[in-house]
Image: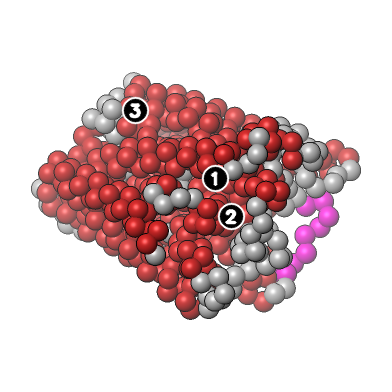
Amino acid sequence: MGEYWWDLLVIGLYFAVIIGIGIHFSRQSGNVSEFSLGGRSIPWWAVLASILASEISAGTFFGTPGEGFRNRNYTYAQLMVGYLLARLVVSGVFLPAYYKNNVVSIYEFLETRFGPQTRRFASMVFLCTRSLASGTRLWVPTLLLVVIWNHWNPELKMSPWQQFWITGVGLVLISLLTAAYTSLGGIKAVIWTDVIQILVLFAALGFSLFFLLGHIPGGWDGMAAKLTGPKDLTLWQWRGDVPANGIWGEIKSVLASEFTVWSAFLGSLFVTMATHGTDQDMVQRMLTAKNKNQSAVATILSGVADIPVTFAVLSIGILLYVFYTHFHTDPHLPLGKDGLADSTRMFPHFVVTMMPPGLRGLVIAGVLATTMGSLGTALNSLATSYSRDFHFRWFATPDDEAVRVKIIKRSTFAFTLILITIGLLTALVKAMNPSLSIIGIILGSFGYTYGSLLGVFIVALFTKSRGNDLGNLIAMISGFIAVAFLSNLPNELFHMISGKNLYENPDWFPVIEFTWRIMFGTIVTAAIALCFRTPSRRELDDTRLAN
């Protein structure tokens, strides 16, 4: 236990700094604009850091090295192409409209363009999807606790209930601590703690790379010499992973594959337009910049910064594969249900078992940083969206700004309890059913719904006379149903419950991967919404706003 004192010291200092930031900014969040948007006074470089902190969640911190370990190549990095292209669209079209209309909740823009029903439905989609996605992600960093337990007690197998209680306690503590500084200081506290967290994260990644390269004879060249497979260290992948015959077979194969050039240019383009243009969680931090130009700079540069970060995290996974396969035998490697190495748990296992004290604490603090950074902004955006889009409209609320800020703060803690509940249920289900794939389904929930959001926003931004409240509701529901069937969701859910398929897909039917879900949802939603005409009064209002 003595070897962990340096780690505990590093982690303790990290917690002290972020709580201090929350207390400092608690005196500067007296009105809704300050609490939710920081008075639009945040410098672009801090907004840039906050965007990065939100994008690099604990799932990314563990999951992306897992992709490198599993595939031993950089094909995942192809998606950066679409990420950059989408940021140009968001910066040139979405952000100017939000700044022009001076929105706090971006769904206010939809009410101006279409009506209150579209705003409320879009906001509800965001609230439900973000709660599910953020709640289930709370379970991911608690993998570290399981790995630490296994390291201390290699001969004792953890029971499902032990795993649940250990991960549950860690989950609750992280959530309450994040809620404390978020409710104290509002978006300013979130963004400035994100700046600290991204610095800790970069240091953790840099030291991990340096440490791994130092433990592989020959460093990078020594690693490359051990990777001689046909796809090892490749970057571009044109064809799908599934064998195919004919043109339609090739298309099906591409749609059924996660990482190809086509998903990089098309699939990830739509994914990022949705996550960075229609998600209150991400856009709210962009709107804290002083003007649309500074916001655009932060947004575009975050895409540029994502490239080296992604390559670094993938490289860690590839180095781990070479390290454990060729240079270090470890009888206690975490295994999956197939008896092979569990790629997702490989990086936390390496951190706990191989890194020296202090440095190990820094990397653990980096994991906490990614979790708390993404959770803090999720809580702030959920509370803001609920308060602006529902509470202030449903209940008689005084115009007193202090009262409104109190409501948002209370909503922050209410959503904290909701996310903790979702996280605990996720941990319980996973502990009792280790092989169950429910985690992947819920974590990818935004893929089923955000296409509907993006489709409506595209109609709102790129047309003047198409779309209305009724048509948008029909279009969004249709988009969700289309993606659910194209991704085989009904069968997956039914199979989890009964162990059988609900129906059999015909041979010609393409089952799409997660990188394509938002694109198809957007296309279906926009196509149906365009069939409905905007009422003339809304056209006039929209024309005045455009001028």
Q: Nearer the viewer, residue 432 or 418?
A: 432
Q: Choose mark 2 or mark 3, whichever is in front.
A: 2
Q: Please provide the residue range marked out in magenta.
A: 501-509
Dots 1 and 2: beta carbons under 8 Å?
no
Count neighbours of disc 3 (C-alpha within 10 A) and say few if under 14, some if 14 to 19, many if 20 or more: some
Label 1 to label 2: alpha-carbon separation: 33 Å
Q: Nearer the viewer, residue 136 or 226?
A: 226
Count neighbours of disc 1 (C-alpha within 10 A) and say few if under 14, some if 14 to 19, many if 20 or more: many
In-image side of 338 versus 363 (left or right)? right
Image location (x, y in percent) of residue 15? 28, 52
Q: Residue at x 74, y 67 (%)?
A: 503
Q: Residue at x 74, y 40 (%)?
A: 226
Q: Quadrant of the N terminus?
A: bottom left
| Amino acid of disc 1 | Gly
Q: Residue at x 30, y 48 (%)?
A: 14
Question: Going from the N terminus, do you reach mark 1 or mark 3 first?
Answer: 3
Image location (x, y in percent) of residue 58? 47, 51
Q: Main secondary structure of the magenta part?
A: loop
Label 2 to label 3: alpha-carbon separation: 33 Å
Q: Which residue is mark 2?
A: 346
Q: Which residue is mark 1?
A: 451
Mark identifier at residue 45: 3
Answer above or below: position of 329 versus 469: below
| Amino acid of disc 2 | Met
Count neighbours of disc 2 (C-alpha within 10 A) and say few if under 14, some if 14 to 19, many if 20 or more: many
